[in-house]
Image (tube, rainbow, N blue to C red):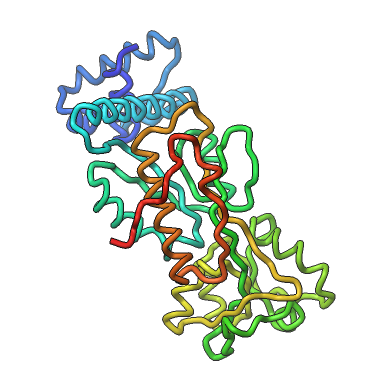
Amino acid sequence: MELKQLTALVTVAEAGSVTKAAERLRLVQPAVTRQIQMLEDELGVPLFVRSRQGMRTTDAGAVMVERARRALIELERARAELRQRETGPVTGIVTIGLLESVIDLIATRLVARMKAAHPEVDLRVMTAYSGHLQQWLDQGDLDLSLLYNLSTSPSIHVVPLLEEQLWATATREAGLSPDSPVTWTDLCARPLVLPVSGHGLRVLIDQALPHTGPEIRIAVETNSLALQKKFVADGHGWTVLPAAGIAQDIASGHLSGAPISDPALSRQVVLGLPLTARTPPAVEAVAGVLIGLIDNLVRSGEWPSTRPLDWNASLPREQHRRPQDSSA
């Protein structure tokens, strides 16, 4: 099995035809066809279904494409690390996962700071809810990720970053204020816009609700943070969201919000890294810039209602250092 065969396999799967794959690879079509046939002969199974419409992977082909893609990415990362030893600057490909609730605060700032500090690092940003991000991290699709309420894992090194309060969120006209906490009794007196059952945030909410007494009225449920905020803005009810997810909406006057009390409800945001023997320099660089950015956001108050945790004590040994200054 040769690298050019794996490259042909992945390219044909992505392009959907040998003709398009050959154009991307700058090869003649018979050469690409020959690479695929040699791979199928070696594996003893067909990898594609051929038709007039093009090429689509068989079940075995889909498995092979996924593994081949990861192998090619790892090879490119190895090449980047070796080039870095010769030339100096940190290089490589890093795929990071960000929680949906923090992308407004973090995503564009992280990209800008990485371009300034490590322009040779190819950064790829994926967003999802914590459960999906953890699964992608376990599967090797992510190099690092923000997660929440994860304390231990057999495959993930967990670095606690901060604890943030969850806020009651309402329309601008409701006039909620960060200085005046809202009790669960007050919150449950309104129709509620909630995440769907099984969602991590919904689990936290459901755990707090038995202590409040009143029966809640659910106006609508959704698995989308953007829809959750839109339903609230359109007057369908109040909701509960992390402070990071509504900080900019409150600052712009689009929504109003206040911390929840009686009881207060919070979540812990952590950084997850694969539990491996070493962290590649490019991943270490992204982790440093990310931690520095979060540290600045917490200290400046732009990420409200947060309590920083001792992240340095939990970092892998080679990363024990102050977070990189991301104020530039």
Identify the residue at horizontal 42%, vertical 49% (top origin). Answer: 322
Image quarter for residue 179?
bottom right
Q: In the picture, which quadrant includes the N terminus? A: top left
Judge by depth and name the residue closer to the eye, 38 or 217. 217
Left or right of 312 in this view: 9: left
Q: Position of residue 143 (x, y in %)?
A: 44, 38
Judged left or right of residue 279, residue 101 is: right
Question: Against 260, is 103 above or below?
Answer: above
Q: Position of residue 328 (x, y in %)?
A: 28, 61
Of residue 313 and residue 285, the one placed in the foreground of this image is: 313
234 or 75, which is in the foreground?
A: 75
The residue lying at 40 percent from left, 55 percent from top is 292
Q: Is residue 12 above or below residue 237?
A: above
Identify the residue at horizontal 55%, vertical 84% (top origin).
Answer: 171
- Figure label count: 0
Give the image quarter of residue 202: bottom right
